[in-house]
Image (tube, rainbow, N blue to C red):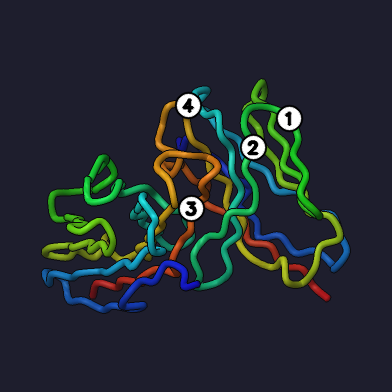
Amino acid sequence: GAGVSQSPRYKVAKRGQDVALRCDPISGHVSLFWYQQALGQGPEFLTYFQNEAQLDKSGLPSDRFFAERPEGSVSTLKIQRTQQEDSAVYLCASSLYESSYNSPLHFGNGTRLTVT
Amino acid sequence: QKEVEQDPGPLSVPEGAIVSLNCTYSNSAFQYFMWYRQYSRKGPELLMYTYSSGNKEDGRFTAQVDKSSKYISLFIRDSQPSDSATYLCAMTAENTNAGKSTFGDGTTLTVKP
């Protein structure tokens, strides 16, 4: 079956533009996570959804970042008025159950955002 | 200082060597410890997870946790060129969502044929 799919794979935005990044999780997966991975660093947690409910957004770096998952499947991460420091790979991950160590995270291959 | 520190690498070994990858951490609340493998331009892939102290073996991989020293390791035996990747350690505290992990910055491994 298909894994986690993210689009676009690459995005170049001029500073100040808004961008929208899409994540298609594995069908039926309850949990969905967004992570940000800067060059040469590990992923950093941004936000978590359980079905359509956003239960944790403590990692979003500013109010320019917004995520939604309105029907409990596809999710969109939106960044308004992009800044150069937003340049990173944005990773989406899903898991079958909520909060279980027997339900591993499946990561997509990410969207590489470059802000010029 | 970061909560999770990982040996920066890069690490280059000949095929067949035993590889040791290490992380230290400062948050004593961390109870769950994971190792991910990340190939270039791909997402991380979970290799192993362990709970609390001790060893766990899976094929050529052994994960070791020493909570008293706040130190974890991943050993790879009989390393292969296909093991060439960045290895990330990750940790989660008790009563925290399993997917909300704190990651190290990764060690890049190259296994030469």
Q: Which residue is mark 4?
A: B94
Q: Which residue is mark 3?
A: A105
Give the Cα separation between the discs numbered 3 and 4.
Answer: 17 Å
Going by the numbered disc 4, the residue's amino acid type is Glu
Q: Chain ID for label 2?
A: B
Give the structural element (helix, strand or loop) at label 2.
strand
In the picture, measured across the screen, residue A70 lies left or right of residue A101, that is left
Give the Cα separation between the discs numbered 1 and 2.
Answer: 8 Å
Q: Which residue is mark 1?
A: B54
Residue B18 vertical placement versus A56 (above, below): below
Query: For the point 71% across and 60% down, which residue is it?
Result: B11
Give the structural element (helix, strand or loop) at label 3.
loop
Which percent across, then down, holds residue A17? 12, 72
Residue A20 vertical placement versus A103 (above, below): below
In the picture, measured across the screen, residue A24 lies left or right of residue A55, that is right
Answer yes or no: do the residues labelled 1 and 2 have beta carbons within 8 Å? Answer: yes
